[in-house]
Amino acid sequence: MSQKKDYESIYKDLTEIEEKILLECIKNNVSVKKNISEETIKKKLPDEYLIGFKKAIKSLLAKGLLVKYRPHNYGLSKDGRILSRRIQDTHQKKFYSNLRILVLVD
């Protein structure tokens, strides 16, 4: 999974709820050694994403992006951190693209 094209195919296969879960993990600086509980992730997600939460967690575990640390505690694998950073960068570019224009105008 170290090739760039593999990350692209995994990124394209992610559902919206899986992206949200990975974003919450990277916001909390989760790694293999620093984990996060299910309850913490659920608190941060909007209610509309809680319906498919368990299925998304199982899918991320199967893809190797999340690592089960203890029951109901998860960490991000190396590949999960790389992909989460990529998702975070794309979201920042999407949401803050107009901010650069505002700064230049002032």
Image (spheres, rainbow, N blue to C red):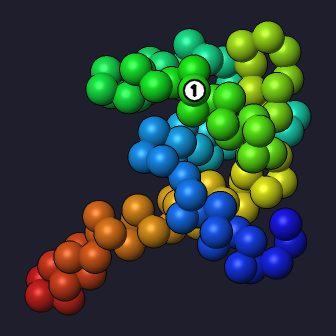
Q: Is 48 drawn above or below residue 90 in the view shown? A: above
Q: Is 30 drawn above or below residue 102 in the view shown? A: above
The residue depicted at 16 percent of the width and 79 percent of the height is 102
Residue bearing mark 1: 55
Q: Is 17 drawn above or below residue 104 in the view shown? A: above
* The N terminus lies in quadrant: bottom right
**Number of numbered discs on residues:** 1
* The C terminus lies in quadrant: bottom left
Residue farthest to the bottom, as pictured: 104
- Where residue 98 appears, as percent x and y from the top left, is 20, 76
Q: Is residue 55 left or right of residue 79?
A: left
Question: SS class of the residue under badge 1?
Answer: helix
Q: Is residue 54 left or right of residue 93?
A: right
Q: Is residue 37 left or right of residue 62?
A: left
Could you say which is closer to the camera, residue 68 or residue 6?
6
Q: Where on the picture, by quarter, is residue 96? A: bottom left
- Where residue 70 appears, as percent x and y from the top left, is 84, 15
- Where residue 99 appears, as percent x and y from the top left, is 23, 73
Q: Say if residue 31 shows up in the picture.
A: no
Q: Is 13 drawn above or below residue 77 in the view shown? A: below
- Where residue 82 appears, as percent x and y from the top left, is 72, 62
Q: Amino acid at mark 1?
A: Lys
Q: Where on the picture, by quarter, is residue 22? A: top right
The residue depicted at 32 percent of the width and 69 percent of the height is 94
Could you say which is closer to the camera, residue 38 or residue 55?
55
Instruction: Check disc 1: other Cα within 10 Å, few if <14, some if 14-19, many if 20+.
Output: few
The residue depicted at 26 percent of the width and 81 percent of the height is 100
Q: Say if residue 70 shows up in the picture.
A: yes
Q: Where on the picture, by quarter, is residue 60? A: top right
The residue depicted at 61 percent of the width and 39 percent of the height is 25
